[in-house]
Image: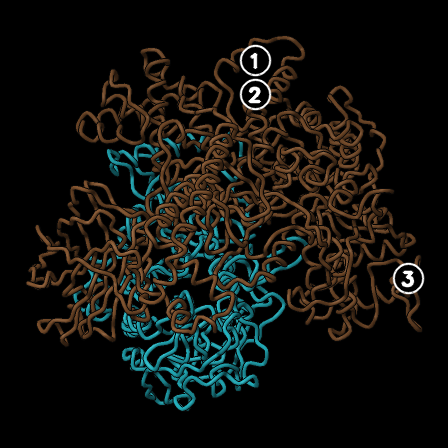
Amino acid sequence: MRLYAGVLLTTAAVCGAAAPVNFERDVRPILSDRCFTCHGPDEATRMVGLRLDTEQGAKAARGPRTPVIPGNPDASEMIRRVSAEQPARRMPPPYSGRKPLTAAEIGTLRAWIEQGAKWQTHWAFVAPRRPELPTVRNAAWVRNPIDSFILARLEREGLAPSAEADRATLLRRVTFDLTGLPPAPAELDAFLADRSPDAYEKVVDRLLASPRYGERMAVDWLDAARYADTHGYQVDPEREMWPWRDWVIDAFNRNLPFDKFTIDQLAGDLLPNATLEDKIATGFQRNHRINSETGAIAEEFEAESLVDRVSTLGTVWLGLTVGCARCHDHKYDPIPTHDFYSLYAFFNHVDEIGNGGPRDGRGNFAPTVRLPEPELDAQAAAKEKEIVEAKRELAGAEALVEPRQAEWERHALSEPPRWQVLAPEDLKASGGVTLAAQPDGSVLASGAMPATTFYEFSARTALTHITALRLELLPDASLPGGGSGRGAEGKGVVTLFEVKSGGRKIDLSRITADFKSEESELDLVLHPADQLKRGWGVNPETAKPHYAVIEPARMFGSAEGLELHVRIGSEYEGAQVGRFRVSVTDSEFPEVMPENIRAILGKDAAARSAKERTDLRRFFLAHPRESRLAHERLARLEAEERAIVNKIPTTMVMHETSAPRDTFVLMRGSYDKPGEKVTAAVPAFLPPLPAGAPANRLGLALWLTAPDHPLTARVAVNRYWQAYFGTGIVKTAEDFGSQGEPPSHPELLDWLATEFIRTGWDVKAMQRLIVTSATYRQQSRTTAALRERDPENRLLARGPRLRLTAEMIRDQALAVSGLLNDKMGGPPVKPYQPDGLWEQLSAFQGRKLFERSKGPDLWRRSVYSYWKRTVPPPSMTIFDAPTREFCIVRRPVSTTPLQALALLNDEMYIETARKLAERMMKEGGAAPAGRLAYGFRLATERTPSPAETAVLEAGLNRRLAQYRADPAAAAKLLTAGEAPRDTSLDTVELAAYTTTAGVILNLDETITRQ
Amino acid sequence: MKNPLREYRLTLTRRQLFGRAAHGIGTAALASLVAPRAFGSKGLPGFPNFAPKAKRVIYLHQSGAPSQMDLFDPKPQLASRFGQDLPDSIRQGQRLTGMTSNQKKFPVAPSVYKFSQYGKAGTWFCELLPHMAKAADDICVIKSLYTEAINHDPAITFIQTGSQVAGRPCFGSWVTYGLGSENADLPAFVVMISRGTGRPVDQPLYDRLWGSGFLPTSYSGVKFRSGGDPVLYLSNPPGVDRAVRRSMLDDIQQLNEANLKAFADPEIATRIQQYEMAYRMQSSVPELTDLSKEPASTFEQYGPDSRRPGTYAANCILARRLAERGVRFIQLYHMGWDHHEGVPRQLPPQCKDTDQPSAALIADLKQRGMLDDTLIIWGGEFGRTVYCQGNLSPESYGRDHHPRCFTMWLAGGGIKPGVSYGATDDYCYNITENPVHVHDLNATLLHCLGVDHTKLTYRYQGRDFRLTDVHGNVVKDILA
């Protein structure tokens, strides 16, 4: 509920004539919200040609009337209209959907006009100037300049700051804020023992130097960058972007300055001598979703990708809702669609296909880079050499057999392959079906009719070079309608065909049929897709014999003959195979002749086109035994090479096309309605590109990070502030435009922004500055009176009390249980989640089923958890993590019963409670009170009060009694999770402690940093 | 604005008044005094804006898009145009999906199904919908819906959220945000999913479709599942029975109360309430999803599938049970309607899945006197093309996506029953009468709930967003 419990503390309460009105703080928000929709920047919807977003528009005479006459509110048309008695004359009109002005708001406008109607450019569009530090009465409280600004405001409001939080609370707060984890007991002890005046600063420096810092900072950036491990949209197949995620973590840890951080991610590929790292950084621009739905129109989703990039750039760097200008001129900020598409043009030169195009072996869409894997690279190179050799051999073999083509052509259509029927032995069928061998070698089914059944038999063959098997579906008088299947009208569908020899599956690669029903999907017979029980059927021609030819990837056979084991699936409910027969051949041309080849053969040789001659020659050359062997060898080597290459991680990057594309304004944002042509340019109301900067992404990045840019630094430091205080100085972290909330402390924001630039965009220094301020160190405990006075804590007369993020809650449980695996980087892992989540929703290529990680991978930090966009990990989303489908810079905070259920019942939390219980029992001494205090302190960094200990102990004893009465239940509770259990501990006791550890992990205090 | 802390203190007093349960925070009766505020909340002040006809919604979304001209919108005259190319005068340059844009011809594929008229309005139904046909006088069939998107993800996102772009709240989230919850023991917005037998592996769904977008996460739909826990993490782990769970909760709540006293943070009070609601859900949800006490007549009414958990039919029974318990928004998704090929093979099983249970749901609610204040919606995200995708034979054909017209039916609270509304041209390609845009539909549905669609707004990124964007007109002709 935090989101909309808005109290605009900054609005001067009631503006009498005496109170000085500030245009930016008091007036613009009113005009923007009530007037700009019809009298703002959007030319298309501007009414009566009046605009009130410019001084010129507001003060120019319009015939006899003038909206704003400085010094004369009574004569100003604006005042007359907003306070008109008649509804028909009153502004804003009811049909606009905007609320009428309140008396206080009208008073503000009057006072402003009375005081001279001073106009200002929107504060956020003017470069920040470093303000003087305000003087404060209680100068002793001030630790750094932040405090001067905060205290000055508090003193104006007649409030005093709160006392500094106790050391344990402070340590827990800052450790979570900087590393996302709780402090270790030893760290707490060290801090409590360190009486030096800079003990706290030393802690902060230790935390900033920890590799955990980068992992913590990355999470917010991953939200903003809409990072995930799948492509999103409904198909949602896998992608590989973790190299980019690792780049981000590393960038924070090595304290890459924010300007360089920006330049690399926007334009790393365009840097002179761009390194692999520089290119990987540009993955930021490829993290958006990509729609590879079969019907997706490439141009449509190219436009969606570009819009996403521009909107994300707007939110993350400009703090503006640039995306609004996609379809129409922005209603509140001076961003016409023309300027939106000028920004879009910066990104419209990438070698990419809007609906993805082919995915590489790692699931990525071009352009990509390959990560260095020296060993695999060497293997691939070796394989490549073999391939060159195999190609040479193939050419030789083809030259050898080529003279036989003419002879083949003469008989190709008249001589069928020589098939040898397999005599079936050991006939078996599942589901109560009876199989009977017939004299002609065929097999007839009867008996039960289960939904699915499998037929199996063995047979011997003496052939040494089997080139194909044939499966015939044969009609039989005993079957419905005299057909070949057991279903209605003799329908029968083959859903699977498998052959084994010597216990090994023969690799079957191709199936052709003389006839197939319209809904058949032949390939599924050899490569069944999960759940898709279709294959080869012959309706409506069920009463005729038909056959399919199945070819192995490689000829097979043995001089001693072979025992074959055949398995045929019949899984299409109500359409079971009735009578069938299997044969083998060593003919060089076993398959059903493709239509095009048949047609070419039917033509006079002289009448064939060049293409037809080539097609025919290719077809022929692939078949004779000698060249077939060479083909097969080459195919095998190529497959092996592919397998090696597919092990080498890739990641998606930006890469400019050689042929730049034209960019047009898209009318109403539609990809198929191009309007005026535009070129890459920055919005006109902001400073121009720096002198000499190229008009490409690199220039754009240099522009954003130029010291006089009014937005970039403000927007960035505001997000940092938000991470520590829960709310930014500008509450609407994503919107610094005229509809955004004005800053609670404008001078502080500007001071921080200029400080950020002055220090060379030093990110760690900025974090240090904030968390070492007296403001940050205040206790969050407060009085009801102050809470009522400032429920959202915008004035900061107390410290921030915030619920931990989804990642922190999980990581903390892992940390206090001792399970946390602090391995960094690499491919994502799949920790515990309830069964069946992906299966229920997914299909097609996105249907790679969830395979839970094992062992220590279950206990990695949450930043490494696999993020499937259409089904994100519920333990994260339940605690307000976004789906990562689009850019988010401000997570909501909710409180729901689902959170309680997750913390109480998720397998992972039972497991961590059990491990925490083991620690309590082994490390917490022998007495229950000591053990409980130990566990409580691990989770909260404080010793429980006697009353709290009493509650915990009473609860423990209750459950000890419960488990003593039911030791089997105790044993069951201890089975949750993969982590091995310490069997030296008593089962009943450990179970009771596990429940109490669960109590501790569920406390509001535990999942909050106070 | 109310002060949550004071509210909480009030309930403490109340609790003392009622007598505190032996082990900490107690009875459902007490907890219900506070719970509706927290999960799904009480709704916005001033909502509903006017007397609502419907109090709750059952939205039967048919994912993949059913073919309107094979089910509701017969075009018998097309039989004589079998295989003829769709005239340009009809297609009017309409864009095509990536699946048929390479087709050289667009041959007309007449439906193979027989249609008859039912009810006092002579509403058309195809032979695959015998049960719905009997419900003709209870429903309003709209044949003139149209949308803007041509592929599944954007289209389903559009009809559910009013925007093709991901990130807006879905219909159910808007409704629960505006109107709040009426049941302290169950979520206000529940989602259930079933797979179609016509096309078992069909268009996927995604959590976002019932997500709250920029609204607080507490307005997201809660997915009820047929396998495993009906609600994620609902069951106690093995070895924890209800007594142990209660004992743990008592500890948690007592310690949280101590913390509440120290910090006076209303968030803590909310958390205490939500833990109690979680506890109540552990019995209310299994009670809800347990169909064993339903009489045999229920299963007869909803059809044989209704005994199998997770089917559309079983979900329809659950929908009725949820409605009985005052759950505000009940969203079903039935997959399997995306018939690009083999319509005559894939369509009948889909109809078999849905026809009897949908009709039963209407009859069941009616018999219980609940149809009057329950709004039922049945339909997909767009329509399908009259021209054939892939191979065409007199017996079989496929149909691609078609945004320019499609059919849905509505029933119950606020909707005029026994009506057939709107019309399409001879090819079922363009609307000729009473077009209803998706925004118009959503405005109308909100109207039935007593909500002025222009007033249900949420400020985000500097503007007031709403389900109907800046569009939408209530279709007064179909209101009761």
Q: Nearer the viewer, residue A50 or B308?
A: B308
Indicate left or right for A707 with A298 as reference: right
State which chain disc 2 sits on: A
Q: What x and y, as percent, mark residue B1?
A: 58, 50
Q: Amino acid at mark 2?
A: Leu
Quick check: do tags 3 and 2 share a chain? Answer: yes
Mark sitting earlier along the chain (3/2): 3
Within 10 angstroms of label 2, few (less than 14), some, or many (20 or more) residues? many
User: Disc 2 on helix, strand or loop?
Assistant: helix
Within 10 angstroms of label 1, few (less than 14), some, or many (20 or more) residues? some
Find disc 1 in the rendering and name its residue: A191
Image colour assigned to chain B: cyan
Quick check: do tags 1 and 2 share a chain? Answer: yes
Tell me, for residue A59, which label it has, or none: 3
Image colour assigned to chain A: brown
Indicate left or right for A65 with A955 as reference: right
Residue B414 showing in the rendered view: yes
Q: What x and y, as percent, mark residue A179?
A: 56, 26
Q: Nearer the viewer, residue B168 or B125?
A: B125
Tell me, for residue A575, which label it has, or none: none
Residue A732 showing in the rendered view: no
Quick check: do tags 1 and 3 share a chain? Answer: yes
Name the image quarter holding residue A447.
bottom left
State which chain disc 1 sits on: A
Report the Cα–Cα distance between label 1 and label 2.
8 Å
User: Disc 1 on helix, strand or loop?
Assistant: helix
| Residue drawn 43% across the image and 25% down it | A820
Question: Mark 1 and 2 residues: CB-CB less than 8 Å, in contact?
Answer: yes
Find disc 2 in the rendering and name its residue: A171
Within 10 angstroms of label 3, few (less than 14), some, or many (20 or more) residues? some
